[in-house]
Image (cartoon, rainbow, N blue to C red):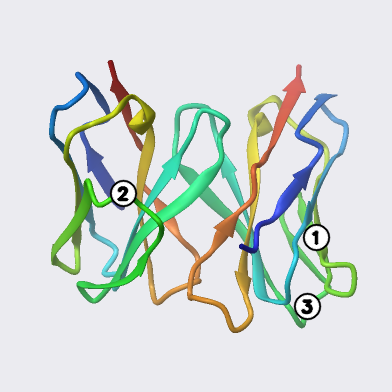
Amino acid sequence: SQQGEEDPQALSIQEGENATMNCSYKTSINNLQWYRQNSGRGLVHLILIRSNEREKHSGRLRVTLDTSKKSSSLLITASRAADTASYFCATDAKGGSEKLVFGKGTKLTVNP
Amino acid sequence: DTAVSQTPKYLVTQMGNDKSIKCEQNLGHDTMYWYKQDSKKFLKIMFSYNNKELIINETVPNRFSPKSPDKAHLNLHINSLELGDSAVYFCASSHGTVNTIYFGEGSWLTVV
């Protein structure tokens, strides 16, 4: 079944640096979403990008989508220790059953 | 103010027991879900209900039975618990399907 794959699995950076996480998927999509999960908590929606969009911004977040390469990236600029969390992409397959399929996540650690 | 609330948060039980997890959302959403997150953080959809009707039923053992008494509630009953059922179970809701999903804080189930 369609599934996003995040890359890298884990990322450790210093506060103030930028963090880039990538997501690849297998089939055509209607939209792609990014979620964040703090340790021991539920997932929180960050941003949704539709298949006809190439880039979207929200605060320090920048998401790009390349449908020809079936990939997306999430950039967090000027990272903070509070950004430490796991980040998941989720895809909605075009013509598929109406469900979001989540990737395995990237665990981001921002060191103070 | 809790949007999606689920109880209990922690549940430790013996193999063979039957247990239930309750979920309620106050967002006025028409779609509710149960997701399972394993020890490797992989998040997989189990069930989805839209207006109290089951619309997604993934390959889940029939020991798992969801029940939606109304649009705001989706409970999960698990019979004859097995060691492999140990995981975090997330309830979630959305307006329509494949839109932004709002997650509960999770229920940590440990089967011993």
Mark 3–mark 2 distance (CA, rounded to whole Å): 39 Å
Residue type at mark 3? Glu
The residue tagged with tag 3: helix, strand or loop? loop
Is the residue marked by circle 3 packed among few (<14), some (14-19), or many (20+) residues within 10 Å? some
Name the disc covering residue A53, or none. Answer: 3
In the picture, measured across the screen, residue A21 lies left or right of residue B40, that is right
Name the disc covering residue B61, or none. Answer: 2
Residue B13 percent coordinates (x, y): 20, 20
**Which quarter of the figure has residue B47?**
bottom left
| Residue that appears at 65% across and 73% down | A31
Q: Chain of mark 3?
A: A
Name the disc covering residue A50, or none. Answer: none
Marks 3/2 in contact by CB < 8 Å: the verdict is: no
Residue A72 seen? yes
Mark 2–mark 1 distance (CA, rounded to whole Å): 34 Å
Residue A68 percent coordinates (x, y): 89, 74
| Residue that appears at 21% across and 22% down | B15
Residue B105 seen? no
Residue type at mark 1? Ser
